[in-house]
Amino acid sequence: MPTVQEIRTRAGGPEPITMLTAYDTPTATAVDAAGIDIVLVGDSMGNTVLGYESTLPVTLEEVASATGAVARGVSEALVVADMPFLSFGVDEAESTANAGRMLKEEGAAAVKLESGPHTVELTERLVDLGIPVMAHLGLTPQKVNAVGYGRQGTTDEAAEEIRDLARQHEEAGAFSLVLEHVPANLAAAITADLEIPTIGIGAGADTDGQVLVLADAIGLTEDVPPFAESFGDVRSEMERAVEGYRDAVTAGTFPAEEHSQVAEDLDLED
């Protein structure tokens, strides 16, 4: 199992870091068995499994429940809990308690914060208390109402702000940094700046690792973002299996004799 300390040392290393999301025990077990380094219990569950239009409605209780389920299904990967909207950054004591819960009660090894100027001091505080922090800059979906879903860091001023925040979060003690939907040359520059690893999504190939939402990676979603790729077609396979079940029940071929048991000693005569 990679530790937080081991992930930190992989900046600039020969083997990229792999990270995928998961939200339940069966998929976490499959992701872990495939040798993925980090399983992120993302607030992307809002869009992918809970039916919300954004990540904003996702609650602390939903992330906590999913984190526990994922941690119980993983034996090798590092489990990181994604702190949902308004569960951090408002009140320091509440932020600390919420983040600490993910480690103390749910089995995560670290938390991820959608970062900004408001999370620099919080990152330092959490790290001082023994709560490892993965920072997240660029497109931060919890700010969708303020910035939308477009590519971030496309002007000199915006790029320099992201670059400066990356340095500040490294200095505050973050052990890694997710860069989402930023120009590839900006991600490359930030990666060169830092001594902690960067993990990209829609940020080009020059980061220290990559992350995708599991539903996109396995072909479960219908609309895959332009910066992602489906490496399977699970949606079609699920539909095929469900149709097969429906047809078997309708035709009377399921359940068959081998699916049933008869209790020979029962006296069912009226």
Image (cartoon, rainbow, N blue to C red):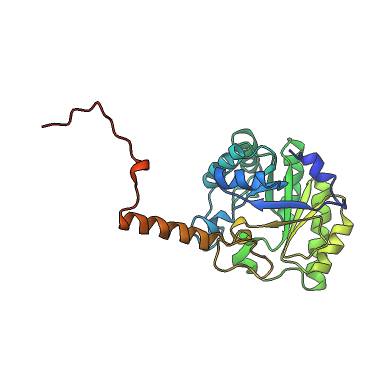
In the picture, measured across the screen, residue 137 lies left or right of residue 240, that is: right
In the picture, measured across the screen, residue 79 lies left or right of residue 9, that is: left
- Picture coordinates of residue 259, whole percent (x, y): 37, 42
**In the depicted structure, whether residue 15 falls above or below residue 161:** above
Please report the residue visible at 59 percent of the width from the left and 37 percent of the height from the top: 72
Nearest the viewer among 193 and 198 is: 198
Instruction: Place residue 163 in its image quadrant.
Output: bottom right
Q: Is residue 2 visible?
A: yes
- Picture coordinates of residue 15, whole percent (x, y): 83, 51
Please report the residue visible at 78 percent of the width from the left and 62 percent of the height from the top: 162
Please report the residue visible at 57 percent of the width from the left and 69 percent of the height from the top: 223
In the picture, measured across the screen, residue 204 lies left or right of residue 142, that is: right
- Picture coordinates of residue 197, whole percent (x, y): 82, 51
- Picture coordinates of residue 149, whole percent (x, y): 64, 68
Which residue lies most toward the left here?
Answer: 270
The quadrant in which the N terminus is found is top right
Which residue lies most toward the bottom here?
Answer: 155
Nearest the viewer among 124 and 51 is: 51
**In the depicted structure, whether residue 57 falls above or below residue 260:** below
Q: Is residue 80 visible?
A: no
Please report the residue visible at 33 percent of the width from the left and 54 percent of the height from the top: 249
The quadrant in which the C terminus is found is top left
Nearest the viewer among 107 and 88 is: 107
Total labels: the figure holds 0
